[in-house]
Image (cartoon, rainbow, N blue to C red):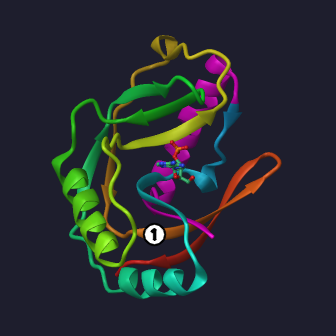
Amino acid sequence: MRLFLALEPPPALRARLGALADLAQAQCGGRRVPDESLHLTLAFLGEVETARAETLIEWLQGEAPQGGEWRLDRWGTFRRPGIVWVGGSTPDPALAALQARLWDGLEALGHGGPPTRFVPHITLLRRARRLSIEALPPVDLTWRWRRLTLLRSFTLDDGPRYEVLARSA
Ligand code: 2AM
């Protein structure tokens, strides 16, 4: 199964991000990520066997992140897959530390290693037709995060769907 570790926005922030996704779609076209799927990926694990997934679930349930605040204040794009996202204009040390700590744990469990570059982002649109984010209004949101979620990704005809497998303390 295809797994990843992420932070899930609380409901009020999810709704705000959904409204931004609507604005972005009106401007850029493409496929809007449904509100319930909005997330920040911290570690993408790819295909994981069932037995290893069970170990991951137990490990995650023993984790208790301290939490932090992430300031979301910029639009961004990943050109080739046509992704439009929101994220932070400056690197966030707490998120970077969380990501590094997670990968230490994941590597100890035998799961590869971190990507060479970690660009924290929340994908709002996929397959955008125009990456004209300069026309979008400014963003300034704060995300108070703490719990981590292990998610399973399925690919359906109209895009990915996610199932929650476990959460940290
Ligand atoms: P995206 O939002 O930029 O598309 C589930 O697929 C999550 O893992 C998504 O958030 C996706 O990022 C991310 N993801 C998918 N494939 C990935 C890969 N090969 N490397 C890193 N992250 C990936």
Question: Which residue, given by chain and number where applicable, does mark 1 sit on?
Answer: 149
Q: Residue at x 36, y 43 (%)?
A: 120
Q: Does mark 1 have its CB less than 8 Å from ligand 1?
A: no
**Local crowd size for mark 1, using a 10 Å CA cut-off: few (<14), some (14–19), many (≥20):** many
Q: Position of residue 123 (x, y in %)?
A: 52, 40
Q: Position of residue 102 (x, y in %)?
A: 29, 67
Instruction: Decide whether residue 15 is among the magenta residues.
Output: yes
Q: Please, is residue 127 above or below residue 143 in the view?
A: above
Residue 108 falls in image quadrant: bottom left
Query: Which residue is nearer to you in this view: 111 or 25?
Result: 111
Query: Which residue is nearer to you in this view: 65 or 113?
Result: 113
Q: Please, is residue 88 above or below residue 163 in the view?
A: above
Q: Position of residue 5 (x, y in %)?
A: 44, 64
Q: Amino acid at mark 1?
A: Thr
Q: Residue at x 48, y 26 (%)?
A: 77
Q: Position of residue 59 (x, y in %)?
A: 37, 84
Residue 43 falls in image quadrant: bottom left
Q: Residue at x 31, y 41 (%)?
A: 117
State left or right for residue 93 relative to residue 156. Answer: left
Q: What is the magenta range?
A: 1-30
Q: Residue at x 58, y 41 (%)?
A: 18
For the stretch drawn in magenta, what is the main secondary structure? helix
Q: Quadrant of the N terminus?
A: bottom right
Q: Please, is residue 86 above or below residue 95 in the view?
A: above
| Element carrying mark 1 | strand
